[in-house]
Image: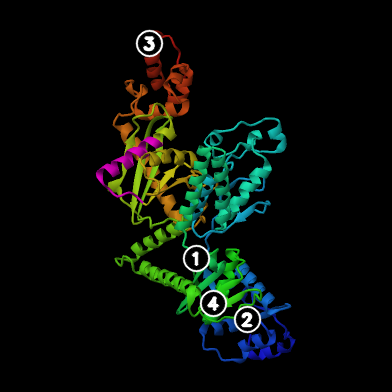
Amino acid sequence: MTGAEFQSISHTIPVQAGIYKYYDEQGTLLYVGKAKSLRKRVSSYFVKNHDNYKTRKLVEHIHHIEFTIVDSEQDAFLLENSLIKQFQPKYNINLKDDKTYPYIVIKHEPYPRVFLTRNVVKDGSEYLGPFTSVGRVRELLEIIKYNIPLRTCNLNLSEQNIRKGKFKVCLEYHLGNCKGPCEGLQTEEDYRENLSQVKNILKGNLAPVMNLFKEEMMHFATNMEFEKAEIMRKKIESLRAYSAKSTIVNTRLGNMDVFSIISEGNHAYVNYLRILNGTIADTKTVTLEKQLEETEEEVLVYAIAYLRDVFKSVNREIVVPIPVEYPEHEVTLTVPKSGDKKKLLELSEKNVNYFKEELYRKKILHLEGKSDMERKQVLYQLQADLELPVLPLHIECFDNSNFQGAYPVSACVVFKDGVASKKDYRHFNIKTVQGINDFASMTEVVHRRYSRLLAEGEPLPQLVIIDGGKGQLGAAMDSIRALNLIGSMTVVGLAKNEEEIFFPGDSESIKLPFNSESLKLIRHIRDEVHRFGITFHRNKRSKGTFKNELEGIKGIGQTTATQLLKTFRSVNKIKQLTLDDLVKEVGNAKAKIIWDYFHPEEGTTNVSLPQ
């Protein structure tokens, strides 16, 4: 659209506050903006000579303009952000943050369960979060499990089912982790009281929970129930220990959001600290790509709106390093000069500086060549997608194999710096398991692998992938626990069909984007462990290690034996076949040899072979 073309329509543009949308000739949304006066703001694009190349290109591509009038500047701000998130126009600020954050859900059901999820479903459940660290979520859930008895089963605990006595208490009840609502041993009112304490813990409000435990401890002590009093004392100590691990700033500060920003060329980096009850509850740094020479103030305001929305913040005070116009009138903006808020701002600035320097460090790592840098980038992406505490430079993957339901073996492949380290591959003949038991086999090989690495003083991997999903993962974790390696490495399970990733103890899986580099690397590792395991099988068979009775028959080779076992599954079933059945499968000559071997008393002299 030229300046002359714009002049012909400029009088039709409203002067009220609102948002404007620029479209190209194909109807693609190019840009969304807000304005106190739409006519004045839009006119500025067409009456000025813009130095910025992207702005000039935007104006050249504008074919038509649409407007939405709103009641206030605040409404325009909220609508602009909503449209940018929904359509991600080419010329708007690009915020590079496509992660799926973990939540803790309180399910909408009788006696609600509490667990980690990344999928928010509108089913009436209550979702607390999101959280920036899945490790923090798991730690919170462990604290809750230790201190507050809640059910973990997925039984349908309707009033009718409980009244009919359909369920029996499980081990969790006998361990004291559940009060047995399935048998009606806990009322819904008591369960709801437990949930209220859970919510207090998740919101960082530990004082009411600790006060309640203190009252119960004193009650038990007064009634001479010293064992129960000691249990409550230990719960109080666990909450104190958890509180001490949190980053306490000043309990008098209350709730607020803290933001800092660094601009560098076309990029800006914004750090966010969420403060709840004087404690740093969450921290997050994002990268934003400027498109039209946006000012630092404009970028910061956009990031504030985005991050407050993502983390569902309702804090009424925002601490920022520079004055900005933020249109939420009920929110107070503070630019501190000294004191505790200034210290918080400085802490946020340390985080954003570290983030920027870490990005730069990652870019210059391993200057040997482009392919090596690309591998590093994939590892950093994998670390981010799986919320790993450290970069997975050393990855190992296990898989079980068997041949026609027999001869179980396992394989382990090793990847270092994103590439296969074949000299470190290992295969295992199963020694302690009788028959086919994939879970027991996995327990054995994981124990053998890491007990040996520990004995030899070799480094442990940062990431271990168990091919086979939840069951195999649980079997592997039995050995990890037995070797006291919890926390020394991250162990995940990979479901064979759906390519879902499970963490130990999680009820729901993670699904990485189908074409993401992270998932491509995991697929490559999985395919490699399959290939290595199958090759091991073939080599063993070719050396006669897996030689069966059929291959012992003179004139019958491995190919024929394999074909028969694949069809009939066992030697016993082959013994029971008629001669006609054998002929149909392997032909006259081989059928006669097999028949003579298994039926020496009958022979084939008087048996008519099919022509």
Quadrant in which the N terminus is drawn? bottom right
- Callout 2: SS: loop
Q: Earlier in the sequence, mark 1 or mark 3?
A: 1
Nearer to the camera, 236 or 559: 236
Within the magenta stretch, is there residue 448? yes
Residue 174, image x and y in percent? 54, 33
Task: Give amino acid for label 3.
Answer: Pro
Residue 485, image x and y in percent? 37, 45
Colour setup of the view: rainbow
| Residue position for label 4 | 299
Q: Earlier in the sequence, mark 4 or mark 2?
A: 2
| Residue position for label 1 | 284
Disc 4 and disc 2: Cα gap in Å?
Answer: 23 Å
| Residue position for label 2 | 62
Disc 1 and disc 4: Cα gap in Å?
Answer: 16 Å
| Residue position for label 3 | 600
The region drawn magenta spans 442-461
Residue 291, image x and y in percent? 53, 78
Report the mark closest to the observer, 2 or 3.
2
Q: Give left or right: position of 399 versus 327.
A: left
Q: Earlier in the sequence, mark 2 or mark 3?
A: 2
Disc 2 and disc 3: Cα gap in Å?
Answer: 91 Å
- Callout 4: SS: helix
Disc 3 and disc 4: Cα gap in Å?
Answer: 89 Å
Magenta residues, dominant SS class: helix
Q: Earlier in the sequence, mark 1 or mark 2?
A: 2
Report the mark closest to the observer, 1 or 2.
1
Task: Give amino acid for label 4.
Answer: Val
Label 1 close to label 2 by CB (< 8 Å)? no
